[in-house]
Amino acid sequence: MTAKSALPISPLAVAFPAMPPIAGVELAVGRAGFYKQDRDDLLLMRFAPGTTCAGVFTRHAVGSAPVDWCKASLAATGGSGRALVVNAGCANAFTGAAGAAAAAAVCAAAAKAIGCAQAEVMNASTGVIGVVLDDGKITTRLPGLIAALDADAWPAAAAAIMTTDTFPKGAVAEAAVGGVTVRIAGFTKGSGMIAPNMATMLAFVATDAAISAGALQTLIDGMTPRTFNAVTVDGDRSTNDTLLVFATGAAGAPLIDRAGDRRLADFKAKLEGVLLDLALQLVRDGEGASKFVKITVNGAKTPASARKIARTIAESPLVKTAFAGEDANWGRIVMAVGRADEPVDRDRLSVTFGPLTAARDGAVADDYSEEAMSAYMKHPELEVGVDVGVGRASATMWTCDLTKQYVAINGDYRS
Amino acid sequence: MTAKSALPISPLAVAFPAMPPIAGVELAVGRAGFYKQDRDDLLLMRFAPGTTCAGVFTRHAVGSAPVDWCKASLAATGGSGRALVVNAGCANAFTGAAGAAAAAAVCAAAAKAIGCAQAEVMNASTGVIGVVLDDGKITTRLPGLIAALDADAWPAAAAAIMTTDTFPKGAVAEAAVGGVTVRIAGFTKGSGMIAPNMATMLAFVATDAAISAGALQTLIDGMTPRTFNAVTVDGDRSTNDTLLVFATGAAGAPLIDRAGDRRLADFKAKLEGVLLDLALQLVRDGEGASKFVKITVNGAKTPASARKIARTIAESPLVKTAFAGEDANWGRIVMAVGRADEPVDRDRLSVTFGPLTAARDGAVADDYSEEAMSAYMKHPELEVGVDVGVGRASATMWTCDLTKQYVAINGDYRS
């Protein structure tokens, strides 16, 4: 487990949590050799028979071979997941029929080795695009990986899928389902892009709860807008973005087949907590990030409108450079609000930074204090609140600042 | 005429053109004192009786007092323009009723001094937002400005409205209307934002052609998507963006009152040329810009779809940092195409850099040469072509690269 990146660890990094075994889940990592450096770049996960699987994938119009494979396979099996093969260093995207064949070859080999149907093997890739996956690099390592499978390799798994990440990212929780304790564990990578690597977000979550594939899909579809789709680093999006959730049922909890079942209440809250924790770690590892910023929009006409305003603020280069400069530049926030092309009442607009009000009722606040603002902006974690004064809908978006380091990472990689 | 900015002149700068007088147009500049530095920050333009006026304004939801004033005045008069007062250093935006009163006071004073209706005076401001315009600083200077009016002050006018611009921007053309030669001259400022100044784009164009206000409005409405709305520096947009075009009719050409009149064919082409020239100079002066990039999208389903794809590429931080790094990173172009959420055929997608093809039919081009690409990317002016393979619509967008200098300008202004 060697780090690939020569980048310094993000100042906003958090520690990898203690990850207990999840009944019915085994992991193993290895080196397929997609990188010249001596590092793990290959992950195999094996799940107990009967494991259900649900996924959320990139809406990117170009897509990739592994995403196509997962979508088709989940549709074919109705949501069955017995294994997952992930590699870093080659995204197998923009590779046409040859790329699709390579993904299929990986999954066929894993299915044969494990003893399941090909469509029960999920596949994810991150790295160079435009290069067909050399599936032989993976298939020849499968026997070794299978021999090495164990229940505790979570930190190694999180590290093996890293590309430009500066720290491995994991989250864990326990929940009660029908009186039985179940566990949830997940890890993720993203969200940077250094040529020739891509900004792919991969996230894999496993639980030993027993939940039908349909119910699991409904759950994660509902949670995505508030978790992975509520964070942004630079607004760019990958061909390979993948969230997969596996439920082994091995904890012995009752099988739940409706997302609305009241016995899932605690589980739902905990699963969303894990997804949000992972998503926020992506922001903390945003390339060059020095500030972690929570942006909340209130008073919007609709939730979609609130989300669009929050995203426009979060993705404005001028807002993000102001955070980097530790400037409470409410003028730039107002600019971004206006640019969202959503209903707002400019005479009721307010902007807050943490506990301080910058603008109220469409003008600078009477009690605005430059000194207090400057002191607040020195914190590494910031909260910006905007009320647009036309309704009752809210949304929250998390982002980081835009620093010279971001440009250096993404522009200077050749020199 | 002193430059305010301590920034080095953009490496992409072009020279200010020789600007001949336009019959019926006089200009004067002065110092109102919105800046501490000794520089001009005030412009008065006077137009001959009968001058028509048309405008295109920011679609920013928050807006500003001068934009509100111009829109209401043009609606009230049906498009009459006898004067224009512009100041730099205070945007008079986000200033509520007090700001509206200040704009009205400026225009009332100018109208009285010139002898026209208040609504025939246009007003534009750029600079700090959230601060009410001190109209006394302007009104006390009006008599001096009127005394100083002359026909040749174009370079001084272009310099007086600069904020973070590093060079003044002008364009000029001649056209024939019904056998009579008419002139078109214009200048612009933008497109940067250094707190507390804003990224406002202001552009003012005058002609001695005789064109009804309605026809003039139709002309510039049609040209804006291909000119000022086809350039982007950082995607941010101001409360104060204003384009005003004045037609004095003083050249003696026949009065044209329909935009579709065939006698306007030459004039239309030349006017659009002036608007495009001005818009492209804004990109050349993009903050920290070191590359001028033309992005053309072909093969889209509709013109709107082509424009959205082109804009998504042009505004992608990852694409823009790759330009800064002189990397022909077609993978990032593909990412941006996919992110636009528009119809594309990934198996027919192609990407070119100047004369070189990077990707063809959805995969890396067979004749792709890293060496040739690297050599091409060293040019200060780049062309990127994308064909998305689903239709026949095209669009072109101009942008610049995203450099550490951009972040320094927008993030470090406090230190």
Image (cartoon, coloured by chain):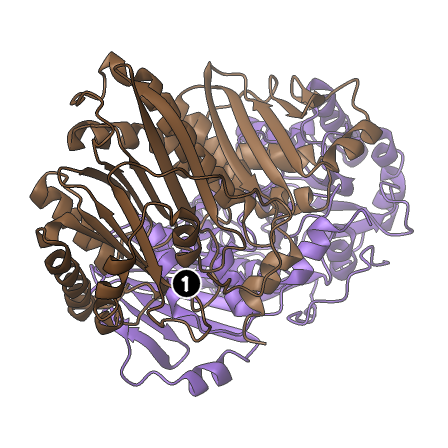
Chain colours: A purple, B brown
* Rendered position, B370 above or below B349: below
Q: Residues within 10 Å of mark 1 (few under 14, many from 20)?
A: many
The reply to whether residue A184 is in sight is: no
Q: Nearer the viewer, residue A394 or B219?
A: B219
* Rendered position, A268 above or below A50: below
- The image quadrant that residue B132 belongs to is bottom left
- Residue carrying label 1: A332
At which x and y percent is residue A286?
Answer: 62, 59
At which x and y percent is residue A397?
Answer: 44, 60
At label 1, the amino acid type is Arg
Q: Is residue A314 left or right of residue A204?
A: left
Q: Chain of mark 1?
A: A
Q: Nearer the viewer, residue B161 or B91?
A: B161
- The image quadrant that residue A21 belongs to is bottom right
The reply to whether residue B122 is in sight is: yes
Q: Is residue B3 left or right of residue B225?
A: right
Q: Nearer the viewer, residue A101 or B323?
A: B323
Residue lying at 40% horizontally and 23% vertically, measured from the top left: B303
Residue lying at 67% horizontally and 25% vertically, measured from the top left: B354
Q: Is residue A140 left or right of residue A245?
A: right
Please tell me whether mark 1 sits on a helix, a strand or a loop.
helix
Q: Tally the marks.
A: 1
* Quadrant (top left, top right, bottom left, bottom right) of the C terminus of chain B: bottom right
Q: Is residue A8 left or right of residue A303?
A: right
Residue lying at 54% horizontally and 16% vertically, measured from the top left: B389
At which x and y percent is residue B336?
Answer: 56, 37
* Rendered position, B106 above or below B304: below
Residue lying at 47% horizontally and 39% vertically, measured from the top left: B18
